[in-house]
Image (cartoon, rainbow, N blue to C red):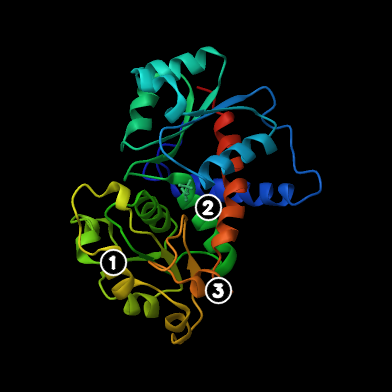
């Protein structure tokens, strides 16, 4: 395939190949000389129409570790502000001999639209509430490091499932790898179709924590809420906030994850986020190796 648009479109063996390749790259980037020449002569444009810290820097570092040439585009200070269309913007960037495009956009399906209208390898770095495939891959990679093969493992995704691309990509990825998946959150933040994805649904956060081996905790995405949802941040933290005391009261030590950015004191207290069972910064570390694997494998399938 020439693109990575979503986890829904790829197979279990594609996922296994990406995770195995990422394990090799993780070894490479832990050596004193972190760089390999794999993508020399490939030029990659990171085009971001929405804010990002982790994904954007992680892709840029992955590209540089692979010796690609890199250009970064941010819509907020670009000619998009003068009315240029998405396809015109990207075709102009591609005219400068760019081979691959990594794209984040607020509109679900924007990278799919682009892939039908331009000639380049496209990697989805998050499209609105739809998918965030490389986040799901780095989450799966990080889970496997902690609990081994994910087949039969119990993973709870806790938070604002309705507005989360991380939740959807995680569900597709974890189900393909054979994990048991539960979503947990206020009923107002669970999509109506959620049970049709083959996941368990739990409204009580304590029960979700008692059930799972790994909890992947998400934030409330106020920026995507068109109407005023229940609960407010204060109400969410009261009923769904996870703290170290709760984690300590469980009869086993679960692995705690969060894709970032954290709203400290809302979905996670600082004593939970910064505890020894939290692997939040390991997820970020693994993101570079996973993105190297994705770019390396896609570069072998030129547009
Ligand atoms: N996890 C994640 O996508 O973070 P950013 O929005 O900072 O890229």
How busy is the neighbourhood of tag 1: few (under 14 within 10 Å), some, or many (20 plus)?
Answer: many
Q: Secondary structure at mark 2?
A: helix
Crowding at mark 2 (Cα within 10 Å: few <14, some 14-19, many 20+): many
Q: CA distance from mark 3 to mark 1?
A: 21 Å
Q: Secondary structure at mark 3?
A: loop
Query: Residue 263: where, in percent of width, then height?
Result: 42, 61
Residue found 28% across the figure and 76% down from its top: 204
Furthest toward the top, the residue is 95
**Which mark is on residue 138?**
2
Upstream in the sequence, badge 3 or badge 1? 1
Q: Is any atom of residue 153 visible in this view?
A: no
- The percent position of residue 169, horizontal first and vertical second, equals 39, 50
Q: Residue at x 68, y 49 (%)?
A: 24
Q: Earlier in the sequence, mark 2 or mark 1?
A: 2
Secondary structure, mark 1, is loop
Give residue 234's mark: none
Q: Which residue is mark 1?
A: 185
Tell me what residue is drawn at x 42 percent, y 68 percent.
265
Q: Are marks 2 and 1 in contact (CB under 8 Å)?
A: no
Distance from Cα at disc 3 to Cα at disc 2: 17 Å
Q: Is residue 54 above or below residue 143?
A: above
Q: Which residue in the protein does label 3 denote?
A: 277
What is the x, y in percent for residue 185? 28, 66
* 135 sits to left or right of 204: right
Q: Disc 3 vs disc 2: which is toward the camera?
A: 3
């Amino acid at each position: 395939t020439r693109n990575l648009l979503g986890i829904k479109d790829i197979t279990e063996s594609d996922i296994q190949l990406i995770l195995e390749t990422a394990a090799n790259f993780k070894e490479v980037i832990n050596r004193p000389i972190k760089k390999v020449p794999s993508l020399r002569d490939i030029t990659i444009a990171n085009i971001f129409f929405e804010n990002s810290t982790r994904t954007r820097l992680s892709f840029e570092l992955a590209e540089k570790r692979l010796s690609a040439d890199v250009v970064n585009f941010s819509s907020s200070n670009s000619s998009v502000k003068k009315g240029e269309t998405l396809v015109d913007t990207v075709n102009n960037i591609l005219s400068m001999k760019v081979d691959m495009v990594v794209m984040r956009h607020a509109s679900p399906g924007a990278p799919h639209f682009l892939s039908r209208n331009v000639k380049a390898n496209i990697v989805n770095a998050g499209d609105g509430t739809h998918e965030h495939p490389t986040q799901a891959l780095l989450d799966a990679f990080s889970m496997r490091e902690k609990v081994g093969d994910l087949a039969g493992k119990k993973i709870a995704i806790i938070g604002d499932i309705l507005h989360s691309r991380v939740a959807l990509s995680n569900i597709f990825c974890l189900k393909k790898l054979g994990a048991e998946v539960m979503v947990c959150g206020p009923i107002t933040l669970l999509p109506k179709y959620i049970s049709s994805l083959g996941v368990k649904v739990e409204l009580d956060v304590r029960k979700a924590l008692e059930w799972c081996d790994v909890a992947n905790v998400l934030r409330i995405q106020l920026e995507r809420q068109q109407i005023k949802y229940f609960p407010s941040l204060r109400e969410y933290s009261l009923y769904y906030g996870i703290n170290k005391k709760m984690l300590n009261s469980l009869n086993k030590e679960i692995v705690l994850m969060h894709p970032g950015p954290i709203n400290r004191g809302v979905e996670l207290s600082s004593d939970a986020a910064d505890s020894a069972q939290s692997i939040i910064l390991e997820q970020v570390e693994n993101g570079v190796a996973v993105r190297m694997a994705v770019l390396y494998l896609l570069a072998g399938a030129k547009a």
